[in-house]
Amino acid sequence: MINREMYALGAKRSAIRELAEYGWKRSAEIGAENVFDFSIGNPSVPAPECVRECMEDIIKNTDPVTLHGYTSAPGDIGCRNAVADELNNRFGSSFTGENLYLTCGASSSLNITLKALTCEGDEFIINAPFFPEYKVFIENQGGKAVIIPPDTDTFSLNLPELEKAVNEHTKAVIINSPNNPTGVVYSEASLKAISELLERKQEEYSHPIYIISDEPYREVVYEKEVPFIPHIYDNTVICYSYSKSLSLPGERIGYVLVPDAATDSKELISAVAGAGRALGYVCAPALFQRVIAKLSGKTADISVYQRNRDILYPALTEMGFDCVRPDGAFYLFMKCPDGDATSFCEKAKKYELLLVPGDGFGCPSYVRISYCVQTEKLLRSLKAFEALAKEYK
């Protein structure tokens, strides 16, 4: 007999993956140039040239046994120190490599952190709209996902609902800024407000409540700054990925950062290492540990995403669609005119527009548009959006 929960997860992919698979199949049928695939957040901007140059240099000048061999489970200490140094230079912090555990991307960072924190009966709060896999990750590590409704006026943190949800079983709150699926960047004021709220609740319940900050889009930001949460709230754990900032989604490299100021930080970083061991993450990819050590602070050409945002957002609002203006990431969250995302997305397929229903994000009357596509294709898609808009007028 197999595990039925795992069967259910494997037998039916997430809505995002299902739509991406449909898009690839449709592209093979009618040509990729004729499919306006806004489903998956796969960066269209190539990795910067310095990535290739760095890889070539490392491969040429590193002993092959060392290059392809195991590293320490938390990651090579020299690489971790290099990442810590870049964070310190950027944020005025004082981290060392001992605060870091290198991972196979943000998904493994989140799973490792949840495994390290979860005890029987623990609850983890997520604010809609949210990345759908959060619920899967929380439940798979033995926790309970508590979903609070969105603040549809700002799509920032819904602090009144958060205060209602925090109780003696709350272990952590997961936040994501810039946000997937809205592109909203949480303000310093809202982060200070959640910090003050959680500090009161920690005192009330006499145990730490952590913020798990999921930050794969930290560098994909336009006019606004992304506040560095450890400067605002001590009990913060950061889960980071280089997938979006360096356009390396398939290489799977990221980290967990546990600041010294976090409660039981030494025990927590050891629990992170133990969780990585228990989950079978022997070590992060050795080659890309060395790449990020040399290229910390570098990014792909983020301006392409801002240009796409500046084309798509005003065009859709002029057509009459109600959209959340993104300040980062590369997603646009749009309200469905009839309030039914599933129906709306099916109608969109008639025009070869592939949009993700908001049901999985906790907002069933919205759709996510992933605009990390070639600008030329984005421009050609506007006629399809116009035709779709006419169906609702």
Image (tube, rainbow, N blue to C red):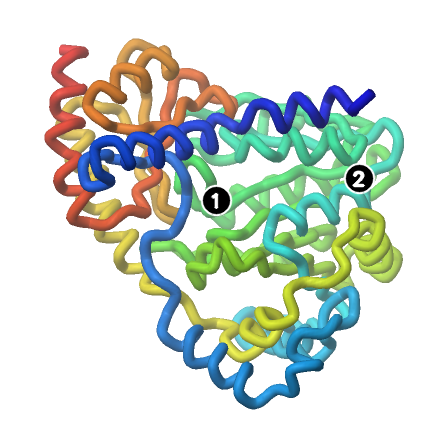
Image quarter in which the N terminus is found: top right
Residue drawn at (46%, 47%) of the image: 178
Q: Is residue 316 left or right of residue 17?
A: left
In this view, 32 is above or below 356: below
In this view, 96 is above or below 16: below
Marks 2 and 1 in Cβ contact (< 8 Å): no
Mark 2 Cα within 10 Å, few/some/many (few <14, many 20+)? Answer: some
Closer to the camera in the image, 175 or 283: 283
In this view, 275 is above or below 294: above
Residue drawn at (64%, 26%) of the image: 9
N-terminal of the pair, mark 2 or mark 1, is 1
Mark 1 Cα within 10 Å, few/some/many (few <14, many 20+)? Answer: many
Q: Which mark is residue 202?
A: 2
Quadrant hosting residue 200: top right
Image quarter in which the C terminus is found: top left
| Picture coordinates of residue 207, whole percent (x, y) | 86, 40
Q: At numbered mark 1, what does the secondary structure look like: helix, strand or loop?
A: loop
Task: Kindly identify the amino acid type of the residue bearing the numbered disc 2.
Answer: Gln
Q: Which mark is residue 186?
A: 1
| Picture coordinates of residue 205, whole percent (x, y) | 85, 33
Q: CA distance from mark 2 to mark 1?
A: 22 Å
| Picture coordinates of residue 306, whole percent (x, y) | 27, 52
Q: At numbered mark 2, what does the secondary structure look like: helix, strand or loop?
A: helix
